[in-house]
Amino acid sequence: MRLPWRAVPPTRTASSVPAGKPNFVPACSSTDAPSLELLRDFVARARRMFVITGAGLSTESGIPDYRSEGVGLYARTDRRPMQHAEFTRSDKSRQRYWARNFVGWPQFSSHQPNRGHRVLRSWEDGEKLHWLLTQNVDSLHSKAGQKRLTELHGCSHRVVCLGCGDITAREDLQKRFISLNPAWRVQAGAVAPDGDVLLEEEQVLGFRVAPCERCGGILKPDVTFFGDTVNRATVQFVHDRLAESDSVLVVGSSLQVYSGYRFLLAASDRKMPVAILNIGPTRADHLAELKVSGRCGDVLSELQPL
Ligand SMILES: [Zn+2]
């Protein structure tokens, strides 16, 4: 059954972020009661929901996204994310990347899950949620205790060696960076969604990058950089979990990146009901029976107070 399209009338509300704190949640309309009821019904009907989350869920934990109007990194800075080929080909690019990542790590790694993450975790307990696919690399679902989880683009809390494939904890690498760079002190600027931070070129010179302890190879965050592709086995695994599910809910993603969008195409092929909770348009709006605009944490905790 496909419900007719539901749009939310634009009624602007004031930001709930305290003065002086950076706000990474875009301005949005408050969610109207009818839309909320339709979403409540959608969730109530689901028994094996497949949920896809994106950066819009983590903005309420203080992590900026890339694309949001006015507050996303693309709007606020001329920075663009690291490209995979640039990272693997260039010593200088890796030095710049790791220097920035080193500075940003204490703040980035300290972010905590918000109400939205906790509601999704509770749906796993209540056997409402079959599988959660996140495009985020911030580990907030893991921190919330989510188990039925695939991190489609990896996780910035892990490091992979491009030589031998060894996986280590990013926290351990931080200790190695500190001992390799005892005199290196830079004030952290704005932290990006991938834990990167803004630094001037001259600040980067002199930063010593750590090699793999096992083979001396190149270390890279265990995340899929732009220009790289997601592992085939992971994609198939997610398709299989999708096939076992009865509905799809998108939370806080514009689905602009194909690696996530493809699962909406697959859901559409399977004629699965799709609902989208996001501020602003998404690439999959035409595939959804219900579109709700609102802050993810606010709306999810309205559906399920914890
Ligand atoms: Zn290695």
Image (cartoon, helix red, strand yellow):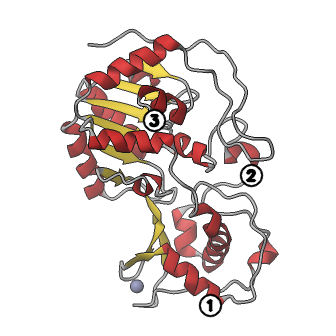
Residue located beneath label 3 in the image:
251
Sort mark 3 into few (<14), some (14-19) or many (20+) by Cα contacts within 10 Å.
many
Against 183, residue 296 (above or below) is: above
Q: Which of the two marks, 2 or 1, is nearer to us in this view?
A: 1
Marks 2 and 1, the one that precedes in the sequence: 2
Q: Whole-percent x and y of residue 248?
A: 32, 31
3 or 2: tag closer to the N-terminus:
2
At x 44%, y 57%, the residue is 143
x then y, percent, for residue 76: 75, 46
Q: Amino acid at mark 2?
A: Asp
What residue is rendered at 61% in x and 74% in y? 98
- Residue pictured at 41% horizontal, 30% vertical: 304
State the image quarter where residue 176 is shown: bottom right
* Image quarter (top left, top right, bottom left or bottom right) of the C terminus: top left
Q: Nearer the viewer, residue 182 or 298?
A: 298
Q: CA distance from mark 3 to mark 1?
A: 40 Å
Which residue is under mark 2?
A: 78
Task: Please name the amino acid that badge 3 sits on.
Answer: Val
Q: Nearer the viewer, residue 256 or 102?
A: 102
